[in-house]
Image: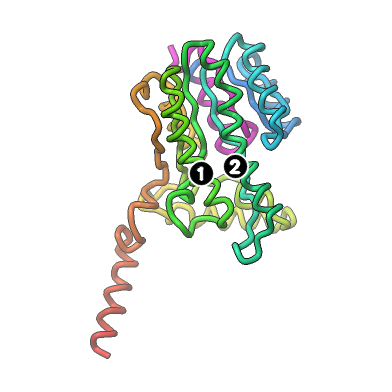
Amino acid sequence: MGRLEGKVAVVTGGCSGIGLATVERFVAEGARVLIADIQDDAGAAIMRRLDGSVRYHHCDVTRESDIAAAMDEAAASFGGLDILFNNAGAAGARLPIEEMTGEAWDATQALLLRSVALGIRYALPHLRARGGGAIINTASIAGLQAGWSPIAYAVAKAGVIQLTRVAAAELARYRVRVNAICPGYILTNIFTADTANPPDVADRIDAALRQVAPDMQPVPTAGAPRHIADACVFLASEEAAFVNGTHLVVDGGLTIGPRHAWDPETKSLIRAAISDAVKG
């Protein structure tokens, strides 16, 4: 029996990247999944491939009515709702604060933070009807430290972490657990999908990122969507029944300290520089 046998889940942004990997893992563990996304062709293909276990519902998470409809559709199609993975997102506005516009700021917050709050709000009646459930929110290491993303994205993800804590406190009485995952450097199309680069340039950027990815963190393996999907299965399952209101960092150790804390080469360069300075 799978760890999510008999459960029903909604995964926003489930047609690609972390979302798709999580849909596949949830299905492998016995869940039925409604994918809420705007990639209609991809959604139809996933439904055909995972016939009977997955339904696709067109959902723009910046539209409140779309979010509400997706939660209702999951309950109507599969008889209820047990798990929500608020995952949909993109890089958002890449402007520095000195160039930021209110429109760009609001669009990023709507996509990355407001959508999570509304996902929780509209999933809650269905979760309560089942006697409880699990909500997982995609945050980021960018919400924990400066320097990992543009400012609008970082602030939105910090908001997701705090939203997770407060929602967990409010919803515990309904036996609804709320947790977040903070991915590190994970190879998805988020780095190139919403840029103005032509496809050939985007492909070259992606190839370069894949080449350097294993060296980004202490664990010498490129971060992959499956690493986040595995964490999602844990947080959604009964194995995490006593885990609530926290954020799980899944980053291969990227945020454990400055690079010289774990990279011998960097440490040697720093020591050499200090030695040269003393001698000079």
Tell me whether circle 1 and circle 2 mark residues in contact (CB < 8 Å).
Answer: yes
Task: Identify the disc placed on residue 135.
Answer: none
Three-letter code, disc 2 = Leu
Specify the quadrant of the image occupied by residue 244.
top left
Residue visible at 24% across and 88% down in the picture: 279
For this rendering, which residue is in front, 187 or 178?
178
Frontmost of labels 1 and 2 is: 1
Q: Residues within 10 Å of mark 1 (few under 14, many from 20)?
A: some
**What secondary structure is marked by label 2?**
helix
- CA separation, marks 1 and 2? 9 Å
**Vertical order, 272 against 27 (above or below):** below
Q: Which residue is mark 2?
A: 112
The location of residue 252, given as percent across then percent down, is 39, 46
**Quadrant in which the C terminus appears:** bottom left
**Residue 121 point in image, percent of width and height:** 58, 26
Q: Counting residues from the N terminus, which is met first, the one under dot 1 or under dot 2?
A: 2
Helix, strand or loop at disc 1? helix
Q: Position of residue 274 (x, y in %)?
A: 27, 79
Residue at the image position 47 percent from the left and 16 percent from the top: 132
Q: Nearer the viewer, residue 57 or 117?
A: 117
Label number found at residue 159 = 1
Percent coordinates x, y for residue 6 in the rendering: 51, 11
Would you identify the image quadrant in which residue 101 lies? bottom right
